[in-house]
Amino acid sequence: MADDADDDHPASAVAIDDRHREREFLARAGGRDRTQAARVLSLDELCARRGEATVAVERWGLAALRGRLVELSARGAAATLTCAMELVIEAQTASEPVCWVTLAGATFYPPDAAESGVDLSALVVVHTPTVVIAARAAERVLRSGAFGLVILDLCAPHTQGAANDLSMAHQGRLVTLAQSHDAAVVCLTDKTEEATSLGSLVSLRVEALRARGVIGEDGTRVLLRALKDKRRGPGWTRTLKVRGPAGF
C-alpha cells in the first residue's frame, strides 16, 4: 500500500505540471502574453539577431525598384507626384527611357515637371480612358523592352476607386514583364494608409507625404514610409530632398 501511494504522488505532480504548461501555451497562443507575441522580422532585424553583418541596401530608388510592382500612395496633401518625378529624373539621368501612362484628365503639370528637372522631350506620355486600357498600354510598353521605368498614374479625380479595376491578371503580367526586362513599374494611387494595397502581387507599397517645417533654400523634404515591403520588411522611413516646382 505504501508503495502504491508513493507511485501516485509523482504521477499527480506530473499531471499538474502538464496542465500548467498547457495553460501557458494557450495564453501565449491567444495573445494574452504580449511579450511572446509573434511578429514578422525584416531581413535586417534577422541578420542583427544572428550577429551577421548587414549590407547597406537602398530601399528606394530606381535600382531598388527594378523587377517589382510598386504602389506609391497617399491621400490629401501628398507628394506622390513629386516622388514619381524624382524617379523619372533619376531614370533619365541614367539614360533610361521612361513612360508615363495616365487616365484622361489626370496628368501632371508639364511646366512644374520641367522646372523640377524632367526632360519632357524624352518622356513618353500615354493618355487612356480606363484603367484596363492603361494596364494594357503599360504591358505593351514593357514588352518592348525599351523602358526602364513605367509610371501608371491611377489618381484621376473623377474616377475615385478606379485603381480597384487593376485586376490580378494585369498585375501578374506587369510583374512578369518587369522582371523579364529589369524595369520598374510604379502605380500612383489616391488612398488612405488604412486602405489595402492594389493586391498581393505588389512588392512594395510606400506612402509619400510632405515633411512639414523643412522647406529651405536647398529644396523641400518628402517623407517616405513603407506600408508593405516583401524584401526588406515594412515600417522603414526615408526622408528625401526633392526639387519642388517654382513658387512652391
Image (cartoon, grey):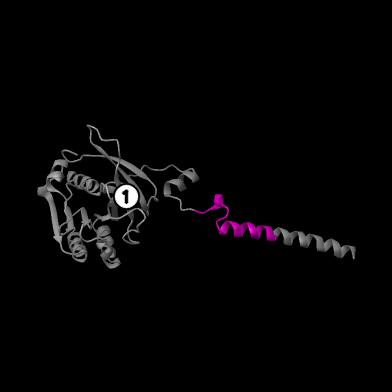
Residue 238 in magenta stretch: no
* Left or right position of 17 against 190: right
Q: Quadrant of the C terminus?
A: top left
Q: Residue pushed farthest top?
A: 217
Q: Is residue 68 visible?
A: no
Q: Residue at 27% across / 55% down in the picture? A: 190
Element on which disc 1 rests: strand
The percent position of residue 170, horizontal first and vertical second, equals 26, 65
The stretch in magenta equals 18-38
Q: Is residue 219 visible?
A: yes
Q: Quadrant of the N terminus?
A: bottom right
Q: Residue at 29% across / 35% down in the picture? A: 214
Label 1 Cα neighbours within 10 Å, binned few <14 / some 14-19 / many ≥20 = many
The percent position of residue 100, horizontal first and vertical second, equals 17, 54
Where 173 sits versus 147, above or below? below
Dominant SS in magenta = helix
Residue 21 in magenta stretch: yes
Q: Amino acid at mark 1?
A: Glu
Q: Would you identify the image quadrant in which residue 143 lies? A: bottom left
Q: Nearer the viewer, residue 128 or 180?
A: 128
- The residue beneath circle 1 is 207
